[in-house]
Structures are given as structure tokens and as C-alpha cells.
């Protein structure tokens, strides 16, 4: 068994879609980034890559590479899962926490879980997603950005 931890953060800006866990969430702002800026999926990929000691998403999908501009993070996650499988790893379970003052994410949690489980090829019961606020404190509490942490178990 191997355990990895991932973290990501992106700034909220106007004129971008808010995509978390592959789900487009209605909101007046979206996350700024080279790809779709899906902070939840980015943290998850880093946890998976970290558990396998295969670097991070910045190494695998450099933000200077135009091939990844506007990339769908679920497609990137699929590539990470294929890499893990080629190295002999399988995913045991993942646990993700999103930190955002707004919007409320509970209505989208199950759809996010389903999408991630499908891409990773694991049972829905092996995907946990939680959301929390920071009680108005810090950059997430003031609505400047959203962050996510993830832990992954590889077998």
C-alpha cells in the first residue's frame, strides 16, 4: 500500500466556468488556470502521482505546453490512471476536501463522485468528497479562490 497527498489552489475570476470534479457548477465566477482549473481534480491527480512517486501534474502536464491549454481535467485524470496502471498500481480509495466560502457544493457532490469513480475505474464507495468553508477567513473565506486537498491509497 502507498499513500499520497495532493493540494491545489486557483484564483476565482469573472468570465470563466467553475468546474469541480468534472462538474460545471453555476456561479458568477470560475477558476483561473491554464487548463479548466478544476482544483479538486488537480489535487486528486497530485495525490495519486505522489503515492506512486511519479512526480506531479506540473511535470506531467506543464502549464507552458499549449497542448494543455483549456484541457479537461477528467481527461488528464484518465491519463494519470493509465500511467498508474502501467506501473502496476491500482487505486484503493480517495478522500478529497474542497475549501470554498461559496458556492454551496453539496448539491453537486454525488455527480462529482460518480464522474471521478468512473474515470478512475473504482467503486463509488471508494470516492469521498467533502466541502467546507473557512468562516470568512483567508483567501478562500474572502472569495478570492478555492483550494482542495486530497489523499489517495494505492494498492
Image (tube, grey):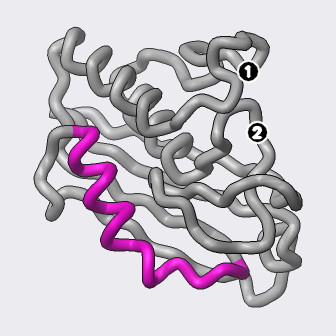
122 over 53 or under it: above or below: below
The reply to whether dot 2 and dot 1 touch (C-beta < 8 Å) is yes
Circle 1 is placed at which residue position? 63
Range of magenta residues: 101-120
Q: In which quadrant is the N terminus drawn?
A: top left
Circle 2 is placed at which residue position? 33
**For residue 137, side relative to residue 1 (left or right):** right
Q: Is residue 1 magenta?
A: no
Q: Quadrant of residue 144?
A: bottom right
Q: In which quadrant is the C terminus drawn?
A: top left
Residue at the location (76% across, 39% down)? 33
> Label 1 crowding class (10 Å Cα cut-off): few <14, some 14-19, many 20+?
some
Residue 47 point in image, percent of width and height? 44, 39
Residue 100 point in image, percent of width and height? 68, 73
88 over 97 or under it: above or below: above
> Label 2 crowding class (10 Å Cα cut-off): few <14, some 14-19, many 20+?
some
Local secondary structure at mark 1: loop
Local secondary structure at mark 2: loop
**For residue 62, side relative to residue 5 (left or right):** right
Taking the view exactly as shown, the residue that stands out farthest to the bottom is 135
Q: Earlier in the sequence, mark 2 or mark 1?
A: 2
**For residue 52, side relative to residue 40 (left or right):** left
Mark pair 2, 1: CA separation? 8 Å
Residue 60 point in image, percent of width and height? 55, 14
Q: Quadrant of residue 125?
A: bottom left
Residue toward you, 15 or 90: 15
Main SS of residues in magenta: helix
Residue at the location (39% across, 73% down)? 109
Residue at the location (88% across, 78% down)? 142
Amino acid at each position: 500500500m502507498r499513500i499520497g497527498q495532493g493540494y491545489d489552489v486557483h484564483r476565482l475570476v469573472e468570465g470563466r466556468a467553475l468546474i469541480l470534479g468534472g462538474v460545471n457548477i453555476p456561479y458568477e465566477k470560475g477558476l483561473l488556470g491554464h487548463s479548466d482549473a478544476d482544483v479538486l481534480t488537480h489535487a486528486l491527480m497530485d495525490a495519486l502521482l505522489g503515492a506512486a512517486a511519479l512526480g506531479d501534474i506540473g511535470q506531467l502536464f506543464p502549464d507552458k505546453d499549449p497542448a494543455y491549454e483549456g484541457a479537461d481535467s477528467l481527461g488528464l485524470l484518465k491519463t494519470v490512471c493509465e500511467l498508474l496502471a502501467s506501473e502496476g498500481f491500482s487505486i484503493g480509495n480517495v478522500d478529497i476536501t474542497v475549501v470554498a466560502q461559496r458556492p454551496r457544493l453539496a448539491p453537486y457532490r454525488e455527480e462529482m463522485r460518480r464522474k471521478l469513480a468512473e474515470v478512475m475505474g473504482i467503486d463509488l464507495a471508494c470516492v469521498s468528497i467533502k466541502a467546507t468553508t473557512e468562516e470568512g477567513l483567508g483567501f478562500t473565506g474572502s472569495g478570492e479562490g478555492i483550494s482542495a486537498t486530497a489523499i489517495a491509497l494505492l494498492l
